Image (spheres, coloured by chain):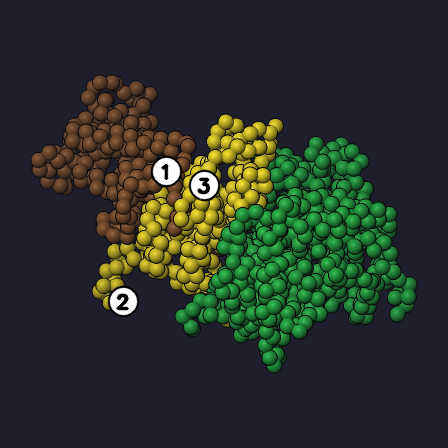
Chain colours: A green, B brown, C yellow
Amino acid sequence: MPELERHSFDVLVIGAGGAGLRAAIEAREHGMRTAVLCKSLFGKAHTVMAEGGIAAAMGNANPKDNWQVHFRDTMRGGKFLNDWRMAELHAKEAPQRVWELETYGALFDRTEDGRISQRNFGGHEYPRLAHVGDRTGLELIRSLQQKVVSLQQEDHARSGDYESRLRVFQEFTVTDLVLDGGAVAGAFGYWRETGRFALFEAPAVVLATGGIGKSFKVTSNSWEYTGDGHALALRAGASLVNMEFVQFHPTGMVWPPSVKGILVTESVRGDGGVLRNSEGKRFMFDYIPEVFKDKYADNEAEADRWYTDPDNNRRPPELLPRDEVARAINSEVKAGRGSEHGGVFLDVSSRLPAEEIRRRLPSMHHQFKELADVDITAQPMEVGPTCHYVMGGVRVDPDTGASSVPGLFAAGEVSGGMHGSNRLGGNSLSDLLVFGRRAGAGAADYVAGLATRPACSAEAVARAERVALAPFEREGGENPYTLHMELQQVMNDLVGIIRKADEMDQAVKRLEDLKRRAAALTVEGHRQFNPGWHLALDLRNMLLVSECVARAALLRTESRGGHTRDDYPRMEAEWRRKLLVCRAAGDGVEVVEEPQRPIRPDLLELFEFGELQKYLTADELEG
Amino acid sequence: MRAQIAHRTLRTDRWWLPPLATFTGLLLISVYAAVRTFMGDYYWVDEHRYLTPMYSPCLSQECLPGAAHFGRPLPALPGVLTPPVVILPFLLGFRVTCYYYRKAYYRAAWLSPPACAVAEPHARYTGETRFPLIAQNLHRYFFYAASILLLINTYDAFYALTAGFGLGNVVLLVNVALLGAYTLSCHSCRHIAGGRLKHFSRHPVRYWMWTRISKLNARHMQLAWASLIFVCVTDLYVALVSAGVIGDLRFID
Amino acid sequence: MGYRGHFRVWRGDSSGGGLEDFTVEVNEGEVVLDVIHRLQATQAADLAVRWNCKAGKCGSCSAEVNGRPRLLCMTRMSVFAEDETVTVTPMRTFPVIRDLVTDVSYNYTKAREIPAFQPPEGVPPGEYRMSQVDVERSQEFRKCIECFLCQNTCHVIRDHEENKEAFAGPRFLMRVAELEMHPLDEGDRVGAAQSAHGLGLCNITKCCTEVCPEHIKITDNALIPMKERVADRRYDPIVWLGNKLFRRS
């Protein structure tokens, strides 16, 4: 047996998307020797898929915009379940994070006077999204990637070694965190290419692994989204919050089958696209919920005027928060008014000139042309809901990103709380930057304050290695692809966009069964680039996280944001005060209720009393 | 170590067709141009004042007096040399260093590469880093020279109009229009007009020119072929009329 | 609807390998990557392929289909006849790791050799002002998804391994152009384009543009403008003469 490859760093960042890279940059700038570990190639992270933009109240398009308005929109979007401190920090710091990207070389679309242009998006009161056409995620990841390279060039100039202080290890999967007396001591994993193991010793780990979408059948998420960070945190003893809230993006492609779920950006609607059913009706007017009645137009004429005169008209209902639109589309299709392939029509061709569509939505034009043979300048798109984002994640300290496990930090989609029960479009990219930076700084401060470095014990490493190799040892078990497909079907059908108690009960039982079968599954071949083995190890994480989702969803007997119960269709103010917290227990998880911290009074004052009445309980309002 | 694949290419389409067509086209035109250059005759139609662009400007002593619009400052040329050899280096230089033609003959004649993802036969490759190919960088000076020749061709075409109006005049005018479009759409021209600027917003007129030229530039290949073929057509027409093989179709005399 | 398609997939690693034949189900609306995944799930569980977003946005699944450099996720099966054999091979220019996966570290090495964006001095974040017309040229280049198909197809390194040292490749020469045209970048990049990054090796045969899945006009908009800038600087006889006479460097 060859000797185990070992590396030693001050801060490990797991994941090289927006949050991970921003955290790594911050840790390195705090003087920490930092490593980034990622499953894909550097620069390919799921962040590239983000299209619409980065929400930041810079006030370039409308000077009335400021952090308070952004904070209000975020809380409303999350139905007041958000961690208010995170929402506050996010709204306050997002503009600085966007401006900082320009110093890394980012080139956003510009306003007439040369500032960053901002576009409309669902749930945002003013045009707020800094963007580059509809490929903003790519711009963000590339800018951060190039900043990493520029820091490496500085290090090279100083030490002759590009990687002396900041190093990226790509195509490496972390399977377990290594602890020392309850604190983080390192991370263990394998090179995807060779299947060989490596141990990274570090007193601080920042999880930035993104989401869990690959547990669902129809999803906009890439293969990387297997809930690794969620599961690593659980197994290390940290807790997850809000796992019942899973966002279904209202507009994913529905045809052809091989691209089902791939995202159609919300900017299509922000730029004038409308939703119609098979009868040609603009049906969103029938689905404006009570709490939004005063903000959204109830007729087509007013809705259409809003695009040119947003101050004197209410917004078109196509721009309602994502959960509302997703549910509306779901209902239309269920009522038999869907399109041929089980979606509805999203039409921008009758709303904008072809040239303008190509300019504003180039990658959507490209995507439909190449993948579905549909010309969106001439035809409507067929769209339907797709699993897009998990609001839940590692419970962290808002200011530092620290979890309850010493040395373990989290930022981005893998962390929870910021978005409450539903995330607004555009708030994800800004979340990555704001909390990526904070987690990087938090980890650096933590390491600087340590008196002794924790150690990775030989037993812990041997244990991690045994777990990773287990699928090869067994014989006669099922193949991981079969189990994965079954898991996706269970989550999609039983814990999907509309939920019921009996179905979720069934889901929990099916998950137990899957867990048992997964423990016996078999992988063939050798360790070198073996996708079957990789899936087998990812499956362990997906099952653990799916259980959190199912158990939490079963407990929350109300409908709110990304959690819709057929049997409890109303939002209950009493439930707003409760968080569902998920922890590892035995070979599974347990979910317990914990009280939500009351919102700070000065932040509450940003809202009108009438609005608070919709969300808060009577005794909260008294205080 | 790269993947060991024995095939030179796995392309299943007829990838050899475009380079073959380019090679054949360039060869035919070269042969025609060489024949006409060393023919030393039938380049001027005195009656209609048609001068073939291949002999313009005609500057040496053997030029027919009518064809020498700018006098005959050069002495008689020795041996087999004919008047076009004076201007040919500039015309040829412009086309040979043109970014489109470079692609065309690097692919078609030098097979470097013959087509995308088809292995080239050469063991070594230094691109345009050393002599003689480093001289490709002189493209813009040939562009300046070609622009002057273009002006002269334009003068010729309008001068011919002073003797009435016939099909030959149309041919000459179309020829200068195509030559003009090809010259204007040149990458060097695009660069000089505005491409070299870092801030378009500070130079609105040059930015406007750049956007127009960029549109033309996208058609540079088509214009290169159209103008090249039409120069030959023009020359052939003038030669045939000059030799009395055909008569010019006259609209106004 | 579905049919049985014929595939030939290169399998092997750096020690050798060859094309293997498969017959596999193909359904309406599928792309080559779907079929490769079906092979993985049904016939060749350890067939290695690199992929990620499956929507043409991340540039991971670069390979060669019937000898043409392409993204597997953006090559629709409908472009092939049902009785046509589809040959899938790894990118040729880079060392193979296994099956369709290649070692693309050359590109990351080259990326590091391009000096980073040099921000304007004395302009604080938030005060950057740029006109849309000034950022558009660089924005086109920033559409690049780094699939490295242009690097793979470029004969300068595809056919001449020895040029890898001196040549940054179209993707990174385009990165130089992007920074050169960035309205606020303060670096001087023209000299290095020729000397350090090998612009002179490019003979503008346009294969990079031909294979770009983002349809970036790499040759016309990045490489030729850079060559013209180099000509401004180095091959302008008047400037050259001036430098000789006055001994400027």
Above/below status of C10 relative to A519 = above
- Report the number of discs: 3
Q: Which residue is mark 3?
A: C10
Tell me: B174 left or right of A611: left
Q: Which residue occupies the foreground of this view, B66 or B85? A: B85
Q: Which residue is mark 2?
A: C248
Q: Amino acid at mark 1?
A: His
Residue at the outermost bottom position: A451
Residue positioned 58% across, 39% down in the render: C42
| Subunit ID for the residue under disc 1 | B
Residue B7: mark: 1
Residue positioned 16% across, 36% down in the render: B83
Label 1 and label 3: CA atoms lie apart by: 12 Å
Residue A619 x %, y %? 91, 66
SS class, disc 2: loop
Q: Nearer the viewer, mark 3 or mark 2?
A: 3
SS class, disc 1: loop
Q: Is residue A71 visible?
A: no
Badge 1 local density, few (<14 within 10 Å), some, or many (20+)? few
Badge 3 local density, few (<14 within 10 Å), some, or many (20+)? many
Residue A167 x %, y %? 50, 65
| Subunit ID for the residue under disc 2 | C
